[in-house]
Amino acid sequence: MVGVDVPVLYEICQRLDECSSKDSGDFQRCIDAVKSSDVSTKKLAIQIVFRYFDSFPGKRVSALNTLMSQLNEPDVEVQKLVIKGLPSTCQRNSDYVDQVGDVLAQLLSARDKQESLLVRKSLSSLLINHPKPTLVAIYCAISNANSIDEKVTMLRFMNEKVSDLLKGELSPLMKQKISGIYKMMLISATPDEIELVLRFMGKSKLISDSEKLTVFTEAMEELVKRGIQLDAEYEDNDAPDFVDTVNNVVKIVLILNSRGPSYILPRKMTNYLFSKFGKLHLIHASDRKDIMKVLASYTYLGNYEDPDDFSYVVKLFDYLRGLLPDLYSADPDFEYGYVDQGNDREWNIEFTELELVSVVVYNLLQKNRFVAKELLAIGSVWKPRFQYLVNVIRVFTRRLKRKLDDKARKGEQDLKDLKLLKVANNLPIQEKSASALREEEQIEL
């Protein structure tokens, strides 16, 4: 500012120290000097404004707004000076705790480590002196945060300080508010973000375990409702927006996994999840795996209300049938050439999905055996495929055993090979000649 530099500020500071009747005009000049383009003048002005903040009640709002405007300054040292001094504006009263606490909470995600530590220290100081309004301020900052990462960072700070500094629990009202935030985070997060939220919730002490289960249940109910609406809007399964449907299903499945298999899937949720059996081919393999893993647990325990339409089970069986290899004519090199050594990883992935889908189908048929009658109508289609699969597994396992035996003779085995060999040796598969195997295949097929 014109006419205000470091020497002038020292003169003003001396007058404010010595005079019992302090001139508000001097203090206003210091406030204006905070906006100076000269860094030295700016820093000194910031310190003076903090020092005499409580001496000029009529200037507090203007002073605080000016100080906070410096948090956007590119000079990190200026930002740190403001962060360090902000708690002093709330030492004698709590009028500005909501504003200061909100701003400091937003700064918890600062990338500069020293700045981040300073923010935590200032916010902790505020929390000790004014616990209730500071918690409310942090809650408001969490509610207004744009990203899941920012919300989790603030919640993590709150979780630490409620335990370490306040030595107690949140009030019932604040717990209710935090539960509401968790619920909205689970609903709005992406599948990747929701895993971050679930991990944090698992360790958090802000709400009880029973309250977490309630949050999970309410979030899933809302996601099912949203999923049904998406299904109605996008009837074309190949539409680009189908990714929203997949993400919605994956989020429900991830929450179910955290909720635990003791939860009983309500009929509406069962209908929604089972309705995706006919669309599994449109879902990415890793997402299919997550979905089928959770459903394998729930269907095994029978913890679901029956769907309105069991045709979903037949669709899942059709998908399983599609996973099986196509029938091949007798191949003289079948035993040695069908399973190529370079495809070991691909085979493992295929068998993993086959296992998961088969388990879900088996569990559903065990509980609802009348559905199996509908499968008899297409028995001529799926029986040869299953028989062929058995032959493929036999060939694959025999070839794997020979490979592991060769490595053992050469002394090249590792721990993984030993485990695989143990499994292969436990399978009831006899060595047969290629011609005998081909004859067996022709008979079975």
Image (spheres, grey):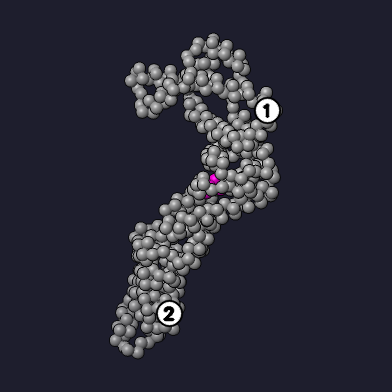
Asked whether, in this view, residue 89 is left or right of residue 179, the answer is: left
> In the rendering, at what x and y percent does residue 184 appear?
54, 57
- 122, above or below 312, in the image: below
Q: Nearer the viewer, residue 158 or 206?
A: 206
Note whether residue 81 is visible: no
> In the rendering, at what x and y percent does residue 297 appear?
52, 40
Asked whether, in this view, residue 377 is left or right of residue 209, the answer is: right
Note whether residue 189 is visible: yes
Asked whether, in this view, residue 181 is left or right of residue 93, the answer is: right
Residue interval drawn in magenta:
252-256
Question: Disc 2 marks which amino acid?
Answer: Arg
Mark 2 is surrounded, within 10 Å at the Cα level, by few (under 14), some (14 to 19) or many (20 or more) other residues, namely: some
Question: Disc 1 marks which amino acid?
Answer: Leu
| In magenta segment, residue 303 | no
Residue drawn where x is 45% and y is 58% of the image? 208
Q: For residue 376, which numbered disc appears in the image?
A: 1
Residue drawn where x is 34% and y is 78% of the image? 51
Residue 374: name its quadrant: top right
Callout 1 secondary element: helix
Q: Quadrant of the C terminus?
A: top right
Q: For residue 60, which numbered disc appears in the image?
A: 2
